[in-house]
Image (cartoon, grey):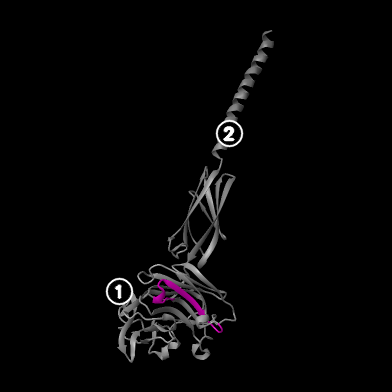
Amino acid sequence: MKINNYFPQKNILFLLLFFSSWITSCGRSNDENLNNNLSDLAVNIEIIGKSSSFINGDGTGVIKIFATAKNATSYNMRIGSDILSSQDGKFNYTVNNSGTNSYTIYVTAYNGDKSISNTTQITVYKAPKLLWSDEFDKDGLPDSTKWGYDTGNNNGWGNNELEYYTNRQENTNVSNGILKINLIKESYQGYNYTSARLLSKGKFSFKYGRVDIRAKLPSGGGTWPALWMIGDNITSAGWPACGEIDIMEHVGNQLNKIFATLHHPNHSGANGDGGTVNISNATSEFHIYSLDWSSNQIKFYVDNQLFYTFANNSNLPFNQNFFLIMNVAMGGNFGGTVDSNFTSSSMEIDYVRVYQ
């Protein structure tokens, strides 16, 4: 009887130990599963320099990515063919492509063999490589290695303009990092207004790229400032066969309305192709007037905000070298009626930058 009773008691004790160990093991396994449970992946992206004026960034092309997920031990970020890894979910990245482009960002959080992912779309502007510029950092007349002059009135320059262009320092000068083109009411060479028209013809021209010009525009009825380009072949081909690209035009009689226009055969003068945008404080604050030019499209911006796109093709004259022109005209077909109280006003230019 003692032997028979001994074995059942031993078996019961073994079973109790087994179930206790099994329950403990299951509890540990459940705790481990809870600790490995990935969830709540959140991704925040900062485009460096983004503001209300520069919605796609400041041109550096730099973005910062901050990813967090519950129980994550590492993270990967993929954009295009580039893949970066991080333990803390923080990434710094510079986009590869120049211009304004859209990107898909894939972020994955990991814990062992488990993962969760997030996909985000962003648009970033990266300034192309600087090809040529004038920062106007030397006082006096503009740099003669970069700029020449058109002078005179030349029969109103085809537009019945009223000014006489000079190369005098009274009409164009650089001071404290700013180029001023001064439109002045005065009697000179038989005309009542003087101004200046600067051009890079014979000194610099280019085909395709981006132009950024930071400028503050003159005020007053009749004023007509322009930032524009003409094809190198104007002497042989004539206008408008050479092509003309007006990056920015403004007239004092239509305050704060910015015009961008392209002139070419059958589309010139009042029949040019173009668009307009209304901005604030064109004559009291600096704005950046930009052109993005390629073989298939030409885009126009103010403060990096696109307002007109033109479809380019091989049959148009916009596939050759162009040179830069900056001037302030008075009156004429587009400038219109001159304010009788006008005495003087200036277009101020902080910089001209050309990128490719």
Label 1 crowd bin: few (<14), some (14–19), many (20+), radius 10 Å: few
Q: Residue at horizontal 45%, vertical 88%?
A: 158
The residue at which mark 2 appears reads as: 30
Q: Residue at image x 33%, y 87%? A: 192
Q: Is residue 60 left or right of residue 120?
A: left
- Residue 156's place in the image compared with 103, above or below, is below
Residue ID for mark 1: 176
Task: For label 2, count other residues whose C-alpha is less than 10 Å away and answer few (under 14), some (14-19) or many (20+).
Answer: few
As for residue 264 lying within the magenta part, the answer is yes
Q: In which image quadrant can residue 20 be found?
A: top right
Q: Residue furthest top?
A: 1
Looking at the rendered structure, the kind of residue marked 1 is Asn
Q: Amino acid at mark 2?
A: Asn
Q: Is residue 15 above or below residue 208?
A: above
Residue 92 lies left or right of residue 187; in this view the side is: right
- For marks 2 and 1, the one nearer the N-term is 2
Q: Which mark is residue 320?
A: none
Relative side of 26 to 147, left or right: right
Q: Magenta segment, which residues? A: 249-266
